[in-house]
Amino acid sequence: STVLASGLLAVSAIVGRRQKHKTVRSAAEEGAKTEKIEVFNPAKEPGVTLPLMYFDPAGFAKMGDRAGFRNLRVSELKHGRVAMMAALGTVIQHNIKFPGFDEVPGGIKALITPPGTYGFIVLLAIAGGMELVVWKQDDDKEPGNFGDPLNFGMYQEEWRNRELNNGRMAMISILGIILAELVSGLDGVEQIW
């Protein structure tokens, strides 16, 4: 009878362990099911504004690919900033000339007319040096965030959206200015009048 009692006790202990193990395992599985990991969604990033909202018809920005999107956003900001300066420069150079550049024509013809060619090479070297040394993108900061050196307090989502939209418009604008100049032979200001 003591052998039977100890046998029953051993069986109940084994069954109890299995039940406890199942309970722990099922609780862990349920916890894993309810605990959702948020997948990176490019449609929730700054730059999703009216009228197009999220616009990526070619599918460059993939769901869950934060690093790929970051690379695209850094490139978009750089191209937008360059395009804003280029669009402004094509208008300004019509009336304002540096000393020694009086005979250089306006528009893209300046690139093939010395000393305009030399000035462009110097400008390109300075801009490249600034990008490599001064405006180096920090991986710990958001794309395009180089701080707020003048303490304007303007690094907010609204201002980031404005910069992205202005950069997008500038890329379209400089493309239009260059194409119109190639067709008409008139620089950016001459095209207006």
Image: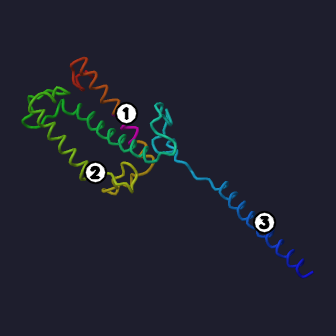
Task: Please tell me whether mark 1 or mark 3 is closer to you in this view.
Answer: 3
Q: Which mark is residue 19?
A: 3
Of residues 175 and 90, the one drawn nearer to the viewer in this rendering: 175
What percent of the width, then of the height, locates residue 193?
Answer: 25, 21
Q: Earlier in the sequence, mark 3 or mark 2?
A: 3
Q: Is residue 122 magenta?
A: no
For residue 109, what is the image quadrant? Answer: top left
Q: Tag 2's secondary structure?
A: loop
The residues bearing labels 3 and 2 have C-alpha atoms spaced at a distance of: 61 Å
Q: Earlier in the sequence, mark 2 or mark 1?
A: 2
Q: Position of residue 62 (x, y in %)?
A: 49, 40
Residue at the (85%, 79%) spot, across then down = 6
Residue 135 sits above or below residue 47 on the image: below
Disc 3 crowd, CA 10 A, few/some/many (<14, 14-19, 20+): few
Which segment did they paint magenta?
A: 163-170
The residue that mark 1 highlights is: 169
Q: Residue 50, percent across and down? A: 49, 35
Between circles 2 and 1, the one closer to the viewer is 2
Query: Which residue bears the numbered disc 2?
Result: 135
Camera-near label (3 vs 2) is: 3
Name the image quarter holding the N terminus. bottom right
